[in-house]
Every structure is written in structure tokens, then in C-alpha cells.
Amino acid sequence: MAIEPRLQASEEAIAHLTRGMDELSEVVARQQREIDVLTRRVAMLMQREAERETEGGGTIPLADQRPPHW
């Protein structure tokens, strides 16, 4: 039983799109993991800097101060 050429072409296109979608899904998952790591690092650095500023002069941490134009 031969498959119609149009049906076979459609099945090949679906297989190709499915593979592409799987690859993109893996890329998005990897990028999300990287974003999570970077977000934690930024939070840690901000916390360290706030502690350093507080220890250094007892002032309000720079990150929590209002900009001079306010």
C-alpha cells in the first residue's frame, strides 16, 4: 500500500517541525537555567554590596537610596 506523495510530504514536514520544536524547547530550558543562576548571582552580589555599604559607614545602602533628582 503506497502512501500518497502529498500525505508523505505532510508527514515529513510534521516530523521536521516536531524535531525543530524539541530542539527549541531544549534551548529555552537551558536558557531558563542560565537565567536562574544569573538571577541568584545578582541577588547575592546586591546583598553583599548592601552589607558592605552598611558596615562601611552605617548609611542607607546605595541601592536603597533615592536618586539625587528626586
Image: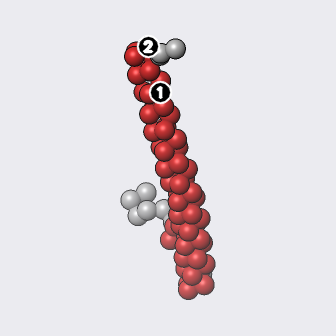
Tell me which corner region of the image, top left, top right, bottom left or bottom right, holds residue 49. bottom right
Residue at the spot 50% in from the left edge and 71% down from the top edge? 62
Q: Residue 31's x, y, as percent? A: 50, 54
Circle nearer the viewer, 1 or 2: 2
SS type, badge 2: loop
Neighbour class for label 1 at 10 Å: few (<14), some, many (≥20)? Answer: few
Residue at the spot 53% in from the left edge and 63% down from the top edge? 38
Quarter of the image for the C terminus: give it: bottom left
- Mark 2: which amino acid? Glu
Residue at the spot 41% in from the left edge and 64% down from the top edge? 68
For this orientation, the residue located farthest to the front is 1
The image's mark for residue 4 is: 2
Looking at the image, residue 9 sits to the left or right of residue 25; the answer is left
Neighbour class for label 2 at 10 Å: few (<14), some, many (≥20)? Answer: few
Q: Residue 65's x, y, as percent? A: 51, 66
Res. 9 in view: yes
Res. 28 in view: no
Residue at the spot 48% in from the left edge and 31% down from the top edge? 15
Q: Is 15 placed above or below 27 here? A: above
Closer to the chain start, of discs 1 and 2, is: 2
Q: Is 22 placed above or below 32 here? A: above
The image's mark for residue 14 is: 1
